[in-house]
Amino acid sequence: MLDYKLYYWDLPFRGNFIQLFLEEVGAKYERHDATELYPERSLKIKNPGMAPPYLYECKSKTYFAQMPAILMHLGREYDYLPKRAETHTLALKTILDSNDVLMEITNFNGMAMWEKSDWEEFRYSRLPDWMKVFERTGLEHGLKGDKGFMLGATLTVADIATTALFGTMIHSFPQLKEDLQENAPQIANLCHRIEARPAIKRFLGAQREELGNGYCGGQIEKSLRKMIE
């Protein structure tokens, strides 16, 4: 029996946050193109959302929108949320921080295309600070070398989100690999470990063979590649 239907474009970007989680927990899901709901039907579904991703949960016949909300729902359903109040809150913060980074790297979801001076300020100032935020969080909770995770000794939704953010980013833009290694070496190692988990490794292998280094698509990705390459 099918557990979920995920509505998103054939791109990693925000969709991979959800797909990596579903792959890790072994959920049965189908990916549907976002155009099946967006934009014509997006305001007519139960619990409407402004834009993809949307997740349809078959057992409850309910739609969920907004990537952070979807991940928190899945984390609760599959017991991938930390137990302590502080780290539970930090799991949400990590997902929200990831969403903010996605917004910023696309220049506020493509409100304007990147200009060289603005991109350099982001890449060499703002992005390193974001990387250091994730690194500091991991270090404070025992992440070091091949041991530990973002929020302690147990894999949580925060690790999936961090990997979907930075693992996807440096695969799509290998030029940023050294940036991550310099500013957040433990996070770089964490992404490598999570991407090597069997179900996630299989999924990413197939996805990357199909999509190459695709990221977010359209004019936004073209603008990014012009800056980086």
Image: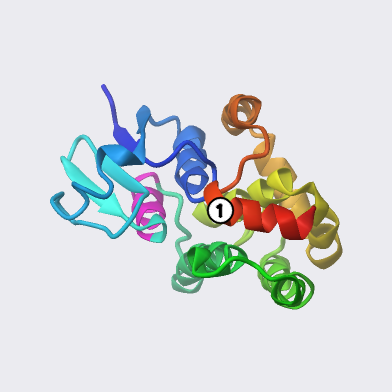
Identify the element where label 1 is drawn.
Answer: helix
Q: Residues within 10 Å of mark 1 (few under 14, many from 20)?
A: few
The one nearer the camera, 183 or 194, is 183
Q: Which residue is mark 1?
A: 219
Q: Which residues are magenta?
A: 69-78
- What amino acid is at disc 1? Gln
Whether 114 is drawn above or below 117: the answer is above
Q: Is residue 123 left or right of residue 150?
A: right
Question: Is residue 74 rendered magenta in the image?
Answer: yes
In percent of width and height, residue 129 lies at: 72, 76
192 over 211 or under it: above or below: below
Q: Is residue 203 among the parts visible in the rendering?
A: yes
The quarter of the rendered structure image containing the N terminus is top left
Residue 221 or 199: which is nearer the viewer? 221
Residue at left 73%, top 56%?
226
Question: Is residue 161 toward the left or the right of residue 141 in the image?
Answer: left
Q: At which x and y percent is residue 139? A: 73, 67
| Residue 13 x/y as whole percent | 54, 49
- In percent of width and height, residue 206 lies at 60, 24
User: For the image shown, how many numbered marks are present on the structure?
Assistant: 1
Visible in this render: residue 153? no
Vertical relation: 224 (above or below) 25: below
Q: Is residue 34 above or below residue 166?
A: above
Q: Residue at x 17, y 55 (%)?
A: 43
Specify whether residue 175 is painted magenta: no
The rendered magenta stretch, by its main secondary structure, is classed as helix
Q: How is the image coloured?
A: rainbow
Of 161 and 136, nearer the camera is 161
